[in-house]
Image (cartoon, rainbow, N blue to C red):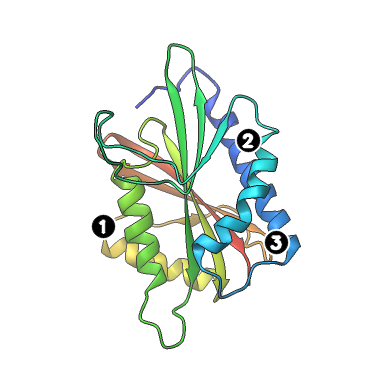
Amino acid sequence: MMTFGGLGLWKDEEKKIHDCLAEAVRELQCAGSVSVSADEKTITGKLRPYIEAQRKKLEYWTLHFEASVFARVSDANPVGHPDIQFSRPFSGGDQWDYDVECKLVRVKRKGKDHDYGEYYVEQGVKDRFISCLYCANVPSGTMLGYVQEGEPQYLLVEINKRLKSAGIRGIRRNGKWQVKGITRLIHSLDRRKAKDFRLHHLWADFR
């Protein structure tokens, strides 16, 4: 894990990324082209051109979709593909890779067995971030949640129940729920390489 203490850079740079994502989401929300039954990949695909347009305002950062990450540099096959990855070279040859995982946030669909809350926790928080698979060399990361159905507070309670069952701290809201907007939530995690890894959750209301 790189040390950012004393640099005075990381929080400012992460804010730029969050602002980029939030503005891209707002533009997609205003376009009104997202169905409440759309799957995650469809929504992310619609979002990509808006993110790319906003990314041009960022200095130094490059943008990759469905990027590849490897457990070891020399491995033949990747172990993961972050939905969105911002990368920035840094002095001394280091590079910051900031990964964003996208997930649906909703109640179960009628006649379906898929548990979206469990998937958010298991295939998002645990497998991507606690495992250090994503954001391996930076102190924080982001999950971008697409809220499609259900009350956000109820969905948060249900996800936190699953986190508690897995022995993981809960997510807390940072400010009021933003109806038809983007609500920011915060999550402090312990993982193998670092204590107090900060996982941000941006929940975009597409209901």
Say which amino acid is labelled 2.
Answer: Lys
The quarter of the rendered structure image containing the N terminus is top left
**Which type of secondary structure does the marked residue at label 3 adopt?**
helix
Counting residues from the N terminus, which is met first, the one under dot 1 or under dot 2?
2
Relative to 57, residue 181 above or below: below
Position of 171 with respect to 192 (left or right) is right
The quadrant in which residue 166 appears is bottom left
**Which type of secondary structure does the marked residue at label 2 adopt?**
helix
Residue annotated with mark 2: 16
Q: Nearer the viewer, mark 1 or mark 2?
A: 2
Q: Position of residue 57 (x, y in %)?
A: 70, 33
Q: Which mark is residue 154?
A: none
Q: Position of residue 80 (x, y in %)?
A: 34, 46
Relative to 189, residue 71 above or below: above
Q: CA distance from mark 3 to mark 2?
A: 20 Å
Relative to 151, residue 62 above or below: above
Residue annotated with mark 1: 167
Q: CA distance from mark 1 to mark 3?
A: 35 Å
Label 2 Cα neighbours within 10 Å, binned few <14 / some 14-19 / many ≥20: some
The quadrant in which residue 181 appears is bottom right
Residue that appears at 31% across and 46% down: 130
Residue that appears at 55% across and 63% down: 42
Say which amino acid is labelled 1.
Answer: Gly
Q: Which mark is residue 29?
A: 3
Labelled pair 3, 2 in contact (Cβ < 8 Å)? no
The quadrant in which residue 43 appears is bottom right
Say which amino acid is labelled 3.
Answer: Gln
Residue that appears at 41% across and 31% down: 138
